[in-house]
Amino acid sequence: RRRSAPGLARLETVDAGGRRIDPTHRRRDERLPRYLWLIAFIALALAIARPQAVLPLPTRLESVILAVDVSGSMRATDLKPNRIAAAQEAAKAFIQDQPEHVRIGVVAVAGTAALTQSPTRNREELVAAIDRFQLQRGTALGAGLLIALVTMLPDSGIDTDAVMNGRAAQPALPDPLKKSAGEPFKPVPPGSNSQAAIVLLSDGQSNTGPEVLKIAELAAERGVRIFTVGMGTPEGITLSAEGWSMRVRLDEDVLKKVAAVTEGEYFRAANTKELSDIYRGLSRQLTFDKQQLTEITALFVGLAGLLMATAAVLSMARFGRIL
């Protein structure tokens, strides 16, 4: 500091560059670095507490099975041009949105279920499998979920023949677990398997094969999430073909229960646009797990370091010192 002239009531100082500074301005300029230092120390204090937050972090998803209803009710035209055509286009868009490393399989579900494309990273083969869909009579959603589950987890210990021999009207299915000489099967928390998921698209009207909720419980015990997409409306539409007619309605209850049991999520598509939006949103949801609790201590430490560096640079540039 120096006096600009003797006897002046007002002092003038110079900064590191030799520029004159009014004392009142100097006091205001000194506050900013001090405030930055104070906020930095607060951030460090919060970092000591090891804070956590729910962040949208990338998942380790490796495989997805698309189970698509190809029963006769998918001829309904409440989705344009009809349910099956809308489902095929949405499924193709979903496949293209998945990361390249994700393996995708396709299961067609009617009176019986069949694996039309084993899990692969080849998107052209998947699109071709979807184009080959042929509508058939009957809907065995339980069989479709079972085929998807054992395809995804071939070593899951599920006796497919024993389960398929069961009927939805029976109070319980035969024991689906194989007895092996190894360690007995131990259930895991529902939804804990972040590497695999099943996407079921249907109007929810299952009328044959294993009980749907029993298969959902098997998936839940192995941590596999099932995301269900309901097509159509609860009011339904009258469908006529080959001299017979019937009203096909969306059965939301079973689809909601399947999703809830496995910690998945249910979506309803009342029109073609909604179906496309659902598949785009579902693709993002599978790619990023928004339910993962993560420690964010490093974020607070980084913020504190940035504030300290900024305060030091401002103080050195203006006053030739750090503090």
Image (tube, grey):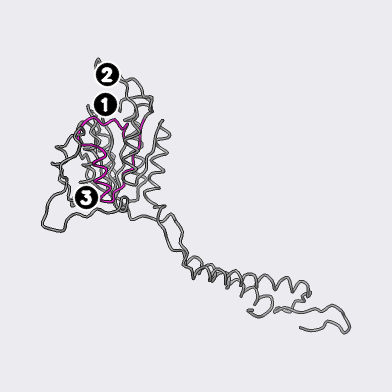
Q: Looking at the image, is mark 2 or mark 3 earlier in the sequence?
A: 3
Is 89 placed left or right of 30 in the picture? left
Indicate the position of residue 193 as horizontal and vertical percent values: 30, 53
Answer yes or no: do the residues labelled 2 and 1 have beta carbons within 8 Å?
yes
The spot of residue 109 in percent (x, y) is 24, 35
The answer for how far apart the CA atoms under marks 2 and 3 are is 38 Å
* Residue at 35% in and 50% down: 99
Q: Which residues are magenta?
A: 202-231
103 drawn magenta = no
Q: Earlier in the sequence, mark 2 or mark 1?
A: 1
Most distant residue in the left direction: 181
Label 1 neighbourhood size at 10 Å, few (<14), some (14-19), many (20+)? some
At mark 1, the secondary structure is helix
Amino acid carrying mark 2 in the image: Ala
Residue identifier under label 3: 153
Answer whether labels 2 and 3 touch (C-beta < 8 Å). Answer: no
- Relative to residue 165, is residue 83 depicted above or below? above
User: What is the quadrant of the N terminus in the image?
Assistant: bottom right
* Lower position in the chain sequence, tag 1 or tag 3: 1
Q: Along the horizontal axis of the image, is 202 left or right of 153?
A: right
Residue 208 lies in the magenta stretch: yes
- Which kind of residue does numbered mark 3 sit on? Leu
Residue 72 marker: 1
- In what element is the residue under mark 3? loop
Give the camera-side residue of 321 and 211: 211
Could you give the CA–CA distance between mark 2 and mark 1, rounded to whole angstroms?
Answer: 9 Å
